[in-house]
Amino acid sequence: MKKPNIELYKKINEKYRKYIVALIFTIFIISSVLTFLSIRQPYEIEEKVIKNTIEEKTSFDYKAKVIPCTLYPEGGIITPDNVIFKNLTEDFIVEINSQIMTDQPVKIEATKSMKYNLIAEKMWEREFVLKQPFKRNYNGISHDLVNEDIHININEINDYLTKIEEETLIRPNYTIIVKSEVTGNIYDENDNIIYEINNILEIPFELSGQYIRYAGETEEKEFINTKSIEQVNIIPQQFNLFGLSLSVTGSRLCSGITAFISLVLLIIFIIEKITNKSASLSEINLIEKKNKGNIINITNKMDIGSMPQVTVKSFKELLKISEEKEESILKYFDESLGIVYYYITTSSFIYIYKSAVVIKGSEKLQDA
């Protein structure tokens, strides 16, 4: 098998070394930038989409059925200005409406009930059921959960309170609180619960001996609650590498490994260069220290083209020839190549030893 030409390899290495190093350095910079960009790129992103919108709307009003009188000549059902006079009233009516509207069809299971509480301030409270709880199912996008006119017989309440006052001999302030309660769940097309209904409406009225007056904290009679149902979509991210779409994990591995390998090669080149320089300087210094008396420095390179040349492999071999021929060793430092030449000239041959390649450029050899 043919042995590799080591000298040829060395010449190629010396000739193209700086281009190879420049190429590896460029690859390192590009792969490092790509690694940084891919690390900043998330694996996936969350995209929120509004799947449905639920609007829950509740409203109420109150009216009275009065007898014909001076204040209300025609009688019938009226909307009072401020108070309802008990002596003129046959029936007290509370209108309650509760709707749920959605963008997309849903299924609703709801239970609703109606009642009112009669309260003697700081004394007692009684509950009266107007409608027993009952369950209803709805499908679609528009649903009237409650659409009721609640009739409260004022005469019956007056009789009830008169008996209590006769027995207790106390006439406190009274409050009537009308309650509408709707509870249940809203389901999507996959029967998943997307909204919980907990609609409790309490309407207070002050009940005195002469009139009934709305006792709410505000005059607001309509309440709207809107809920957006969001769906989160997980979208895997791709990293665009020179027109190719790679997964974020793949791009991180590819660019990271490339950056690591190129960094290792650069470190090897740097260590090799430092080692070669140190070895060259150490050899030069050692030669100068041990053989200073046998070496003559010259400033001009000798014209050795016309004489036979013998290149020796080590300075020790050159020193042995010097002793045998009783000739001095000449030293010349070629700054352009960064090489130190040691010569022995005889009548027949020129013996040469070249040092290893050392610092080039403006740097100088120690003791050269």
Image (cartoon, rainbow, N blue to C red):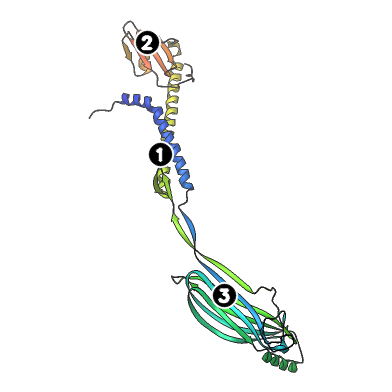
- Please report whichever mark, 3 or 1, sits nearer to the chain's N-terminal start: 3
Q: Residues within 10 Å of mark 1 (few under 14, many from 20)?
A: some
**Residue 184 is at least partly visible in this image:** no
Q: Quadrant of residue 210?
A: bottom right
Q: Which residue is found at the position 56% from the left and 72% from the top?
A: 56
Q: Position of residue 79 (x, y in %)?
A: 67, 81
Q: Secondary structure at mark 2?
A: strand
Q: Which mark is residue 344?
A: 2
> Mark 1 highlights which residue?
261
Q: Residue furthest front?
A: 74
Q: Position of residue 179 (x, y in %)?
A: 62, 81
Question: Disc 2, disc 3: CB below 8 Å?
Answer: no
For discs 1 and 2, the disc positioned in front in the rendered view: 1
Judge whether 87 appears above or below 348 on screen.
below
* 35 relative to 197 in the view: left or right: left
* 243 relative to 158 in the view: left or right: left
Q: Residues within 10 Å of mark 3 (few under 14, many from 20)?
A: few
Judge whether 51 appears above or below 28 on screen.
below
Task: Tell which of 345 and 230 is nearer to you.
Answer: 230
- Please report whichever mark, 2 or 3, sits nearer to the chain's N-terminal start: 3
Task: Tell which of 109 and 325 is nearer to you.
Answer: 109
From mark 1 to mark 2, how far is it between C-alphas?
47 Å
From mark 3 to mark 1, how far is it between C-alphas?
64 Å
Q: Position of residue 234 (x, y in %)?
A: 45, 58
Q: Position of residue 206 (x, y in %)?
A: 71, 82
Residue type, label 3: Asn
> Mark 3 highlights which residue?
198
